[in-house]
Amino acid sequence: MPDRQPDIAFFRSLEQSLHRPDIRRSRNAVGEWLADDFVEFGSSGSIYDKPTILDALAKEPVANSDAAIESDDFRMRVLSADAVLLTYRTVSRSSELGIERHALRSSIWQQIDGRWQMSFHQGTIVPNR
């Protein structure tokens, strides 16, 4: 069990790393950060598990690599000594497609076997600000 308050900057860094195309396509990197029982509620309404996410991210087209994802408004709520809820907003911009997509995101991070892993994620598309 951790002996100090988790740091929001640490979790913000993890989330922002997961937005980088080179990390997203790496099964090893993403696989280390996702818990074995990971679940994602996608913006399409689909439910994904860890193997499905790893497959999908590994196959993301390289053309998507120009899509810049900006994130802000991070907030953290400590759920227990070994779990936190992180919420934030993203804006995805694709110069190739000329589109911008805003989303509210939430992730639950749990300390499992001494390291922090994401056990849940949800992204909800929202109107542009």
Image (cartoon, rainbow, N blue to C red):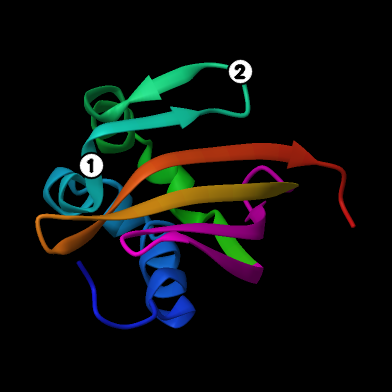
Task: Identify the residue at horizontal 60%, vertical 57% (top origin).
Answer: 87
| Residue nearer the viewer, 80 or 40 | 80
* Above or below, comparing residue 86 to residue 128 in the picture: below
Under circle 2, the secondary element is loop
Magenta-tinted stretch: 72-99
Task: Identify the residue at horizontal 61%, vertical 18% (top origin).
Answer: 45
Q: Quadrant of the C terminus?
A: bottom right
Under circle 1, the secondary element is strand
Q: Residue at label 2?
A: 45
Is residue 126 a member of the stretch shown in magenta? no
Amino acid type of the residue tagged 1 in the rendering: Ala
Quadrant of the rendered structure where residue 14 is?
bottom left
State whether the magenta stretch is mostly helix, strand or loop: strand
Task: Identify the residue at horizontal 15%, vertical 52% (top origin).
Answer: 32
* Above or below, comparing residue 35 to residue 92 in the picture: above
Q: Residues within 10 Å of mark 2 (few under 14, many from 20)?
A: few
* Above or below, comparing residue 26 to residue 129 in the picture: above
| Residue nearer the viewer, 81 or 63 | 81
Q: Work out which residue is located at the far top of the displayed protein and give it.
A: 46
Q: Residue at label 1?
A: 35
| Residue nearer the viewer, 62 or 51 | 51
Q: Nearer the viewer, mark 1 or mark 2?
A: 1
Q: Residue 108 at what x, y percent from top left?
A: 44, 49
Q: Residue 85 at what x, y percent from top left?
A: 51, 56
Q: Residue 1 at what x, y percent from top left?
A: 20, 66
| Residue nearer the viewer, 36 or 22 | 36
3D distance between C-alphas at marks 1 and 2: 21 Å
Quadrant of the rendered structure where residue 115 is?
bottom left
* Above or below, comparing residue 126 to residue 59 in the picture: below
